[in-house]
Image (cartoon, helix red, strand yellow):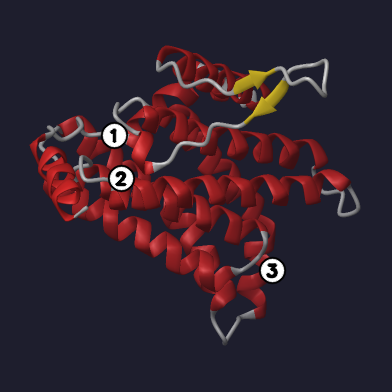
Amino acid sequence: MAENNTTENMETENLEAFPTVYVLQAIKNAQQKHGLRHQNFQRYRTYCFDKIKRVRKCLKFTHHHKCTPKYKNPKFQLRPITEDVIDNVRFFEILIFEVERAWAYAMQLKYECNDDELSRKKFHKMNKLRRALEHALHLEQIAKTHPRVDSTTKLEVQAYCAYIGATLGVESKQWKSAEELYKKGIAIYEKLTDVVDSEEMVALYEARCKEIQPVLKVCAHYASDDVDVTETKKLKVDFEQVQDLNLEFDVRS
């Protein structure tokens, strides 16, 4: 057993590292080309679904549909992506767009329910954001432990996961948690600007930090113990406008 483990470790070390996965660039390009330029979240969600299905088929890692004697119809068997099955960098595309699909569904529900506090879509939206965070944490865990993932990819995934968690915090009005996660994301992107040589990526990271700043200011205000009533009234009026600006950046950057 010890010899087998040693052999497996040596084989893992001999394998080349995966190419760097630029998560932020991938999602920005996909959002701009597939619906979010016109705030069409349903179209983007459909694209994410088709993308996942297409990549799974390409990798020959589709879900099973096996017939059993007891049931006439095929029985669905889920094939989750775990660390041990990842032998191609394209598996990370599946994991990333699983997050994006759940996030897009949540944003679609958000703009459909508008200000109706009693709408069931509001609760559906929160469930989808929690699902997006679950997928993001799963992605982060795999990137953290997989031996063939480089340090830049790990930082990209950590920043992306922090952003999704902060989005959930804002929607659930957990201001302190959202503030901490936004600060974590900004710190990682600032670190990435020193690591990456591409000017395009540096500009993208700086733009993401600029995008986060207005929402971070709102989170910091509501998370503070001493809340100014006058400033709070202004923020209540401007809060949706801040979120709209945040969305517009997502579309146009």
Q: In this view, does 45 lie above or below 119?
A: above
Q: Which element type, helix, strand or loop, lies under badge 1?
A: loop
| Amino acid marked by disc 3 | Lys
Tag 2 and tag 1, C-beta contact below 8 Å:
yes
Which disc is residue 124 wearing?
A: none
Residue reaching furthest right?
118
- Residue 200's x, y, as percent? 21, 30
Q: Nearer the viewer, mark 1 or mark 3?
A: 1
- Given the image, on which type of amino acid does mark 1 rest? Tyr
The residue that appears at 48% across and 47% down in the rendered structure is 136
Question: Which percent across, then down, holds residue 24?
Answer: 36, 36
Do tag 2 and tag 3 residues touch (Cβ < 8 Å)? no
Badge 2 amino acid: Glu
**Quarter assignment of residue 26:** top left
Residue 159 shows in this picture:
no
In which quadrant of the rendered image does the C terminus lie?
Answer: top left
Q: Which residue is drawn at 51% across and 22% down?
A: 52
Mark 1 closeness class: few <14, some 14–19, many ≥20 residues within 10 Å: some
Q: Name the residue under label 2.
A: 156
The span from disc 2 to disc 1 (Cα, nearest Å) is 7 Å
Q: Residue under circle 1?
A: 22
Label 2 – label 3 distance at C-alpha? 36 Å
Q: In this view, does 67 lie to the left or right of 242?
A: right
Report x, y in % for residue 118. Answer: 91, 53
Label 3: which residue?
233
